[in-house]
Amino acid sequence: MKYYQLAKTYIWHNKDCYCINTINRTSSAPLSPNLWYAETLVWSLDKYERGKNILYQDTDNKDSIQTHQYLVEKIFKKGIRSLMCEEDN
């Protein structure tokens, strides 16, 4: 897998810290090995800023940070639960 970083943002909501990380990466599907796309992961962080768990994952077109920006705004305003609950979206 080839990849490179597009955006990384750290957000505090209440007492919890999250890292939103977006990379461009190649597909791992054997039929599309040269297909590039943007992958965004949301990690919960511990007090040493180490990733504990992947809480959310989404994809977008290559070089796009729209998903990244959307998740940053959503978590900043409403917290991580807003990504998991349909009625809050």
Image (cartoon, rainbow, N blue to C red):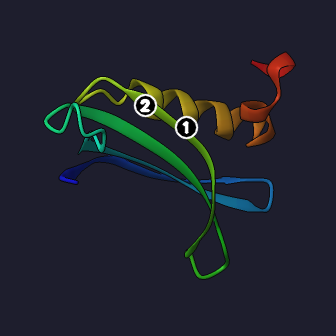
Q: Is residue 48 left or right of residue 61?
A: right
Residue at image position (86%, 17%) is: 87
Q: Quadrant of residue 16?
A: bottom right
- Which of the image's four quarters has the N terminus? bottom left
Q: Check the image and report above or below for 2 versus 49.
A: above
Label 2 Cα crowd, 10 Å radius (few <14 / some 14-19 / many 20+): some
Question: Can you name the residue that lies furthest to the left here?
Answer: 34
Q: Quadrant of residue 39?
A: top left
Query: Mark 2 vs mark 1: which is more N-terminal?
Result: 2
Which residue corresponds to mark 1? 72
Three-letter code, disc 2 = Thr
Residue 60 pos. (x, y %): 38, 26
Q: Are marks 2 and 1 in contact (CB under 8 Å)?
A: no
Residue at image position (19%, 31%) is: 35
Q: Is residue 37 left or right of residue 47?
A: left
Rounded to the nearest whole Å, what is the CA distance between mark 2 and mark 1? 15 Å
Residue at image position (65%, 31%) is: 74
Residue 13 pos. (x, y %): 73, 51
Three-letter code, disc 1 = Val
Q: Nearer the viewer, residue 4 or 33?
A: 33
Q: Nearer the viewer, residue 30 or 44?
A: 30
Q: Is residue 4 left or right of residue 8?
A: left
Question: Can you name the residue that lies furthest to the right here?
Answer: 87
Q: Quadrant of residue 49?
A: bottom right
Label 1 residue SS = helix
Label 2 residue SS = strand
Which residue corresponds to mark 2? 59
Q: Which numbered circle lies on residue 64?
A: none
Label 1 Cα crowd, 10 Å radius (few <14 / some 14-19 / many 20+): many
Q: Nearer the viewer, residue 57 or 13?
A: 57
